Image (tube, rainbow, N blue to C red):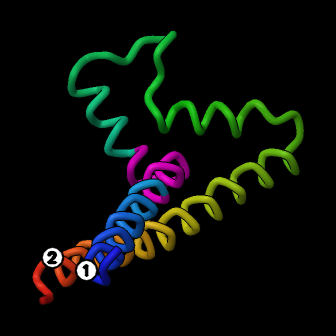
Amino acid sequence: MSSNAWLILAGVILVLLGVLIRWRTARYDLEGAAIDSAWTLARGRRTAVNPTALEAKLRDIQAQATWKGKAGKAAGTVAGHFFAQASAVVAIVMIVGGVLLALVGMLWR
C-alpha cells in the first residue's frame, strides 16, 4: 500500500474510534440526558412505564437503601458526567484529526 492509502486508513480508523468513544460515553452525559428528557416530554412520550432519562437516573439514585449509598451513587453519576465531557473533547479531536489525515492522504501527491 502506498503512503496515501495508509494516511487515509489511519484517518478512517481515527474517525471510527472517535465515534465509538462518543457513543460509549454518551450514556454518562447528564447534558445529553437533559436534552433527551426534554424531547421525551415535548413529544408526549413520558409515561409511568417510560420515564425520561433524568428520571431514570434519579430513580437509580433513590433506589439505594442508605444515605451513604445514595451519596455514592450521586457522586458516581457526577464523576461519570465529567468523564463523559472530557471523553467527548478527546473524541471530537480524534474525529477532526482523522478527517484531516484522510484529506491529506487523498490530496497529497
For residue 82, which quarter of the picture?
bottom right
The kind of residue tagged 1 is Asn
For marks 1 and 2, give the CA distance: 6 Å
Q: Indicate whether 30 appears above or below 2.
A: above
Q: Indicate whether 30 appears above or below 14.
A: above
Question: Can residue 15 be seen in the rendering of this structure?
Answer: yes
Magenta stretch contains residue 30? yes
- Residue 8 lies, in percent from the top left, at 28, 72
Name of the residue lying farthest toward the bottom: 109
Mark 2 lies on a secondary structure that is helix
Q: Quadrant of the C terminus?
A: bottom left
- Side of 2 where 16 appears, left or right: right
Query: Which disc number belongs to residue 4?
Result: 1
- Side of 66 where 5 appears, left or right: left
Labelled pair 1, 2 in contact (Cβ < 8 Å): yes
- Side of 49 where 92 appears, left or right: left
Magenta stretch? 21-33
Q: Which residue is mark 2?
A: 106
In the image, 107 versus 43, the foreground residue is 107
